[in-house]
Each structure stands twice: as C-alpha cells, then as structure tokens.
Amino acid sequence: MSNSTFSERLKIIIKEFNLDNVSLAKAGDISPQTITGYLKDGRVPNQRILELWVREFNLSGTWLLTGDGSMFHKTDVSDPAILRMQEAERIIKEHGEIGLEIVRLSLGTSKYSPKKESNCAEEKIAAG
C-alpha cells in the first residue's frame, strides 16, 4: 500500500485536472464543503462518490483508494466495443438529449427506429 493519504491523492486529482473544490464536488455530486472535509479531516468518500470520480476522470479505482499502481485506468483503445462506447458517450455529452437519441437510433432502440420488416423466408429457415 502506498504511503500517500486519500487527501493527498485528491489534491493530485485537483492539480492534474486543474479543478477547484466546486468542480470536483460537482463531479462527485456532493457539496464543496464535503470536499474540504476530505482534504482536511482525512475522511474518505463512499463508494458512489468514488465511482463517479473514477468514471469522470478515468481514474484507477485501486490508485484512488490505496495509492497503488497507475493513477489512470488503462483501457485497450483498440477494442471496437470500447471505441463505440466512447463515441456514444462523446455524442451524448456533446449533444445532450439529441445525442442520446442519436445513439438510440444507431442501436435500433429509439422509438423512431424503423421497424424491421418481417422476412417470411428467414422465419421459415429459423423454424426449421
């Protein structure tokens, strides 16, 4: 286990991402006063807050909790599924509700997706 404290790692995140307490609090869905408590009192946030920060900043959960390993979560950026998820996330963040609908349309889960016409030949083959 690393010798750094949770508050020291939190300060590293603040510096690395050029954040203030308000921005970090918003990312964790908590108050800026709570951030001050983590920085000064040595308290550690609950799992939900940690998960929000891990996702928002692509942090390694192990590093955030213990200080061990790399600060950032490593992903295989050549994995097509990860690339598609990252693109979907980017579209949603950039375009909000419209972006979400774009992603749904591409997945065929939108209420506006065209209904696939039934193909009797395919149904007969599938039925045996």
Image (cartoon, rainbow, N blue to C red):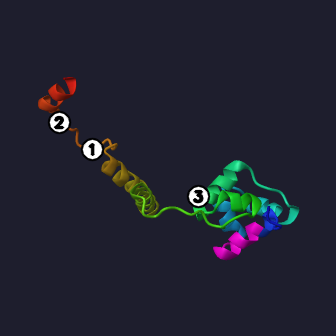
Q: Nearer the viewer, residue 38 or 122?
A: 122
Amino acid type, mark 1: Ser
The residue under label 2 is 117
Residue at left offset 72%, top offset 72%: 12
| Residue at figure coordinates x 21%, y 38% from the top left | 116
Helix, strand or loop at mark 2? loop
Taking the view exactly as shown, the residue that stands out farthest to the left is: 121
Mark 1 or mark 3, earlier in chain = 3
Residue 118 point in image, percent of width and height: 17, 32
Quarter of the image with the N terminus is bottom right
| Residue 112 colored in magenta in the image | no
Q: Are the residues tagged 1 and 3 within 8 Å (C-beta)?
A: no
Q: Which residues are magenta?
A: 9-20
Label 1's element? loop
Q: Is residue 81 above or below residue 6?
A: above
- Residue 31's tag is none
| 10 Å crowding of disc 1: few (<14), some (14-19), many (20+) | few
Q: Which residue is mark 1?
A: 113
Q: CA distance from mark 1 to mark 3?
A: 30 Å
Report the amino acid beneath label 2: Glu
Residue 101 lies, in percent from the top left, at 36, 51
Q: Which residue is label 3 attached to?
A: 55
Q: Residues within 10 Å of mark 2 (few under 14, many from 20)?
A: few
Q: Which quarter of the rendered picture does the C terminus lie within?
A: top left
**Mark 3 neighbour class, 10 Å CA radius: few under 14, some 14 to 19, many 20 or more:** few
Q: Nearer the viewer, mark 1 or mark 3?
A: 3
* Residue at image point 70% right, 72% down: 14
